[in-house]
Amino acid sequence: MIDIDPNSSGLPGIEQLRTIVGAVMTVGLILSVLALIISAIIWAYGSNSSNPHLAGKGKTGLLISCGAAIICGGAVALINFFWGVGQQV
C-alpha cells in the first residue's frame, strides 16, 4: 500500500505561494464587495427609472458577486472536503 501526503516543505517557495494565494483571495473578496455595491446601484437606478432590463442586470450582478464571494471564502474548505473524499476512494 502506498501512503503519500502533501509535503509543505518539499519545494522552495511554498510559503511565498501561500502568501500569494492568500493575497489573491483577498483581492477576490474585495472585488466581490465592489461588484455587489455597483450591482445594487444599477438595480436601484433601473428600478427608479422604470427600466426593467437594467434592474434585472443589477439583480444578476448581485447574485454573481455573492456567488463569487462564496467561492473565494469557501475555496479552502471545498478543496479540503474533496481531498478527504479522494482519500477514501
Image (cartoon, rainbow, N blue to C red):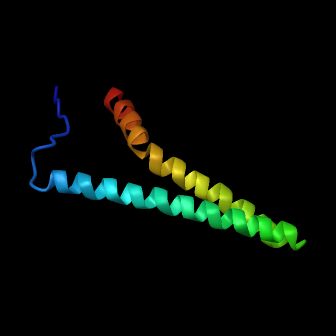
Judge left or right: residue 38 versus residue 42.
left
In this rendering, the count of numbered labels is 0
Judge left or right: residue 8 versus residue 87.
left
State which quadrant residue 48 falls in.
bottom right
Q: Is residue 46 above or below residue 33?
A: below
Quadrant, the C terminus:
top left
Pick whichever, 30 or 74, lies toward us: 30
Residue 68 appears at what percent x and percent y?
54, 55
State which quadrant residue 86 falls in.
top left
Pick whichever, 88 or 51, lies toward us: 51
* Residue found at x 79% / y 72%: 54
* Residue found at x 53% / y 47%: 70
Quadrant, the N terminus:
top left
Q: Is residue 70 above or below residue 45?
A: above
Residue 17 appears at what percent x and percent y?
22, 56
* Residue found at x 17% / y 34%: 4
Residue 30 appears at what percent x and percent y?
48, 60
Pick whichever, 70 or 80, lies toward us: 70
* Residue found at x 73% / y 69%: 42
Q: Is residue 21 above or below residue 84?
A: below
Residue 5 appears at what percent x and percent y?
19, 35
